[in-house]
Image (cartoon, rainbow, N blue to C red):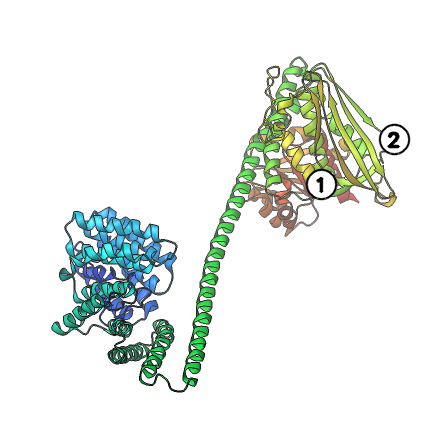
Amino acid sequence: MGFPLFYIFPQFKITPLLRNLTLSAVFFLFSLTILSQDSTSIDRDYINKLTDSATTFYNTGNHSKSLELTIKIIKAAEKINDTGNLLNGYRYLGYDYLMLNDTIRARDSFEKAQSLANLINDTQTLGLSYMDLANLYGSSKDQLKKALIYHKKSIETFKASNDSLNLGTAYYNTAYTLFDHDKPDIAAIYLYEADKYKYALDINLRAGIQNSWAEYYLEKKDYEKVDYYLSEVFLDTALHKSKLDLADSYDLYSKSLYAQKRYKEAYEAGDKYQSLFEKNIDQLQTEKSQKVAAQYEVAQYKKDIERTELQNELQANNVRNKDRVNQILLVVVIFFFLLIAILLYAFFTRKKYVRNLRIKNIAYLKAKQKSEELSRSKTEFFSTVSHELRTPLYGVIGLSTILLDDPALKSHEEDIKSLKFSADYLLALINDVLQINKVDSKSLKEEFVVFNVRELIQTITSSFEYMRLQNNNVIITSIKEDVPTYIKGDTIRLSQILMNLIGNACKFTENGTITVLIKAVSVSKNKCRLHFSIQDNGVGIPQERKERIFDEFSQIGSKHYSYQGTGLGLPIVKKLLALHNSEIKLESKYGEGSNFYFELDFSIAQINERPEANAPLGTSTSLQNKEILIVDDNRINQKVTQKILEKSNVICTIAGNGKDAVEKAKHSHFDLILMDVNMPIMNGMEATEKIREFNQNVPIIALTAVEIKEMRDQIYASGMNDIIVKPYDIHKFRHTIANNLHRLVV
C-alpha cells in the first residue's frame, strides 16, 4: 500500500510501515478523559498534564521521552485506582513500544489494556482494544490469521453498539491489513464496507479510503477509476482547506498518468510529489526524528529510481531516435539503484534476524535462570527434609541401641531389635530418596580412596545380619584369589551399589542363599577390572518386568512379601554405574531366583599408598573420665548421646544452644565438644567460631542430620575438627571421638 495521508497527531506523519497500526490511537486519546471520571480532580489534572506532555513528545518523534511519561501515567492511575486512565495508559504505552520497534512489550501492553476493557465492560473501549491487537499482528507477515481474528472481533463489537465512526475505521484497518499482505481482492470487500461510512469519518480517514481505492484500481489497470478517486481526494482537500499531506496521492496520480502515456501531466504530478516529499524530509530533519528519516531515505531511493525512469521515458518520447548512449546510461543507473535496493533489503533482513535471535537468547537465559532456581529450591527442600527426618530417627535408633545393651530388658530383645530395624529401614528409604535426587542433579562428587576390598565386603554383608535372620537366609561371600587386596576407588558409591543389590536380594528371598561373588576380569600392574555378582534363589523376576524394575518407583508386585521398599534401589544402582561408564545386567527366572552383575575399573594401590595397620585405640579406655560438652537443642538427642558416652565412663555436660555452649567452654575445661549444627539462638558453626577466639586446641566434632557433602566446607571453615552424621553407628561414634582425643594427645 502507498497511502500515508492520515495522522495520529497533527505534527507527526505516520510511516508507511506503521500507519495502520497506529490508526486506532486517534480514538485512544479522545477517549482518555471519558473513562477517568472516578479520579480526584487533583490527580486527574496531573494525569492530563502528563498526557499532554507525552502527546507532544510522541508527535515530535521523541518516543523514549513519551514512553517515560506514559509509565508515570500508569503509576499515577494505579495509585488512585483509576481503571479508565490505567487502561488508556497501557494503550498509549503499546504504541510507544511499537514506534520503538519493541513488538513484544507492545503486545503485553495491549493485552493488559484488553483485560482492563473486559473488566470495565465498556463496548467502545473493548472494540478499540481488539483494533490495537489487530493492528499489532497485522504488521507481522506471518500473523495474518491472528490479525484477522481481532479485526473481526472489533467489527462485531462496533456493529453491536451501532458505533458507525469506529466501525468505518475497523473496516478500513481490516482492508489495509489485507492490502499489506497482498490480498487486494479480499481487502476490496472490507474497503467497500468502509466506503459506506466515509462521510462519518474525518478527512484523513476519508482520504485514506479514496487513496486505497485508487491504488487498488491502479493494480487492476483501471485508470479511469484511479483518476476518479484521486480527484475526490484533491477536491475534498480543497473544499475543507485541509493541510492533508498529498504526497502519496500525487505519486499514485503520476503513475496513472504515466501508464496512460500522458507523460507531460505525469511529469507535472511527479514534480508535485517530489516537492511535497522534500518538504516532509525537511520537517523530519527539523524534528530530529532519525528513525523516521531513515525510513524516508529508503523510500527516496525507490522514488529516485522511478523518477529517473519517468524522466528518461519523457526524453525518449521527445527524442526517440537520438543517441543510444542515453539508453545504456539508463540501464547502468537502474542496475546501480537495484543493487542499492538489494543491499538495503539484505541489511534490514539481517537486522531483523539479529533482533529475533537476541530476543530468543533473552528468553533462553530467563528459562535457564528459572531452572537453576527450581533446582536450588529442590536441593534446599531435600536438605531440610533430611534434617527433619534424621533428627527424630537419631533418637529412635540411639535409644533402641542403648536398650539392647540393657540386661534388664533381655526379655524384650526381639521387640527392641524390630524397633531398631524399622528405624534403620526408614533411614534407608530417606537415603534412597536423597541419593536419587543427588544423582539427578549431578551433585555427586567422586572420592577415590585406598581400601581393603575384602574388609569392605565383610562390613557390608554384616550390616544385613538382622534382615538375614528375619528371612532365614544364608549370605555367602566369595572373593577369588586373583582379586587384589588393596585397590583405589570410590568406596561410597561402591557401597551404595552393593548394599542396594544385597538388600534387594534379602527382601525377596526366604529360606534361601544369597551369594556375593567378586572375581578379576583383568589385572595389570596398575589397573584391574572386577566382576561383581549378587545371586539369590528367591522369588525371581517375570520376563515382562525385567526392563521396568530399573524405572524409579517401580515395584516387582509380589504378593508374598509385605514390604517392597521405595522402588528406588535399582534405579540408583543403574545411575551410579552409569557415572562410571558401566551398566547393571540381570539374569532371572521367575520362581528360581536372580543374578545381578556388573563390572568396574579400579586402580591397584601401591605399597606406599596402603593404610598402615595402627594398633587399636582401646576406645573404652581412651574415653574414661574424659570431660565432654554435649551441645544439642533436642532433649532426646541430648539423652541418647549422654547415655552412649556414660557407658564409656565419660563425664558429660549439657548445653541447649550455641550461646550456652560458648559460656560453658569459656569458664570450664573440656577434653572434647560435640556440637550440633542447627540450633536456635546461636547455631553450631557460629558457636565454634566464638570458642576458637579463646580456645584453639579443644577438639570440636559436628553433629548434623544434614547430608555431610552439603555442609562439609562450612563446617570445617568454622573451626570444627570432624563430622558425625546422625543417626550414626555407635561403634563408629565412639571411635571418631577416641581418634580426635588421640590426635590432641599426640
Spot occupied by residue 150 in the image (x, y as percentages of width and height): 29, 50
Q: Quadrant of residue 302?
A: bottom left
Please tell me whether mark 2 sits on a helix, a strand or a loop: loop
Query: Residue at left 34%, top 79%?
Result: 313
Residue hosting label 1 = 580
Task: Judge from the rendering whether residue 73 lies leftward or rightward of residue 409; answer left or right.
Answer: left
Query: Residue at left 16%, top 49%?
Result: 161
Spot occupied by residue 274 in the image (x, y as percentages of width and height): 29, 79
Q: Residue furthest bottom?
A: 323
Spot occupied by residue 688 in the image (x, y as percentages of width and height): 62, 47
How dense is the environment of label 2, judged by Cα within 10 Å: few (below 14), some, or many (20 and up)?
A: few
Mark 1 belongs to which amino acid?
Answer: His
Q: Earlier in the sequence, mark 1 or mark 2?
A: 2
Q: Residue furthest front?
A: 321
- Circle number at residue 605: none
- Circle number at residue 481: 2
Task: Judge from the rendering whether residue 8 lies leftward or rightward of residue 655; answer left or right.
Answer: left
Mark 2 belongs to which amino acid?
Answer: Glu
